[in-house]
């Protein structure tokens, strides 16, 4: 299985947002930059059988931008296990039970959850130093997904590696 991990794009400042954190949206700049990143992802000839996103608005908006660019809006699903404070072991179980027939899965979520999740799958520990920039993308190869060491890190790209400010 190819497991892709994408951090949501630039969102509004938490300190300046009056609503609940789960409703904090992408900024206009964040949405624009994510559209460019999604176009570059497509140029890499990536394909996704399912896009599984945090239900938090900023992640949802990020996932929707990617789904639209890849013309796979019907493949977009949401998991509470990808939200801030989600349960990564439960996410692995959800993928194994609900999405195991898929070979290419894109996960869209938040930090520090995503870097800890990647660390666990690559090293078996949560403390591997991984930096996921907003809009950053990672590819893991997995033979048998489990919550523990089971994946190889194929690559990790910061947004600046995918696009130049345009």
Image (spheres, grey):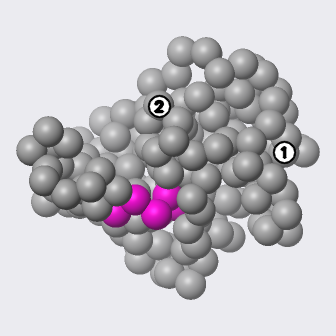
Asked if one can make out residue 115 in the rendered structure from this viewpoint, the answer is yes
Q: Quick check: is 55 in the magenta stretch?
A: yes
Vertically, is 75 above or below 128? below
Between 5 and 36, the one lying in front of the other is 5
Query: Which residue shows up at 31% across the image and 36% down it?
Result: 160
Q: Quick check: is 8 in the magenta stretch?
A: no
Quadrant hosting residue 89: top right
**Residue 116: % across, % down:** 59, 28
Query: Which residue shows up at 73% across the image and 49% down it?
Result: 90
Vertically, is 108 above or below 135? below
- Dot 1 falls on a residue whose secondary structure is loop
First-in-chain label (2 vs 1): 2
Query: Which residue shows up at 59% across the image and 62% down it?
Result: 79
The residue that label 2 is drawn on is 112
The residue that label 1 is drawn on is 145
Vertically, is 31 above or below 14? below
**Residue 4: % across, % down:** 61, 49
Q: Residue furthest left?
A: 16
Is mark 2 in CB contact (under 8 Å) with mark 1?
Answer: no
Count of numbered tags: 2
**Residue 43: % across, % down:** 46, 59
Left or right of 125? Residue 114 is left
């Amino acid at each position: 299985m190819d497991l892709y991990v994408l951090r949501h794009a630039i969102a509004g400042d938490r300190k300046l947002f009056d609503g609940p954190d789960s409703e904090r949206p992408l900024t206009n700049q964040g949405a624009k930059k994510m559209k460019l990143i999604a176009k570059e992802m497509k140029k890499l000839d990536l394909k996704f059988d399912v896009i599984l996103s945090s239900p938090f608005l900023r992640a949802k908006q990020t996932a929707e931008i990617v789904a639209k660019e890849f013309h796979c809006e019907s493949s977009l699903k949401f998991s509470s296990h990808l939200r801030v404070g989600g349960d990564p072991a439960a996410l692995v179980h959800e993928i194994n039970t609900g999405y195991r027939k898929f070979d290419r899965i894109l996960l869209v979520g938040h930090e520090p959850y995503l870097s800890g999740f990647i660390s666990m799958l690559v090293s078996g520990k949560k403390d591997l130093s991984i930096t996921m920039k907003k809009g950053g993308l990672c590819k893991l190869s997995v033979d048998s997904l489990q919550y523990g060491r089971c994946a190889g890190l194929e690559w990790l790209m910061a947004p600046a590696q995918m696009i130049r400010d345009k």
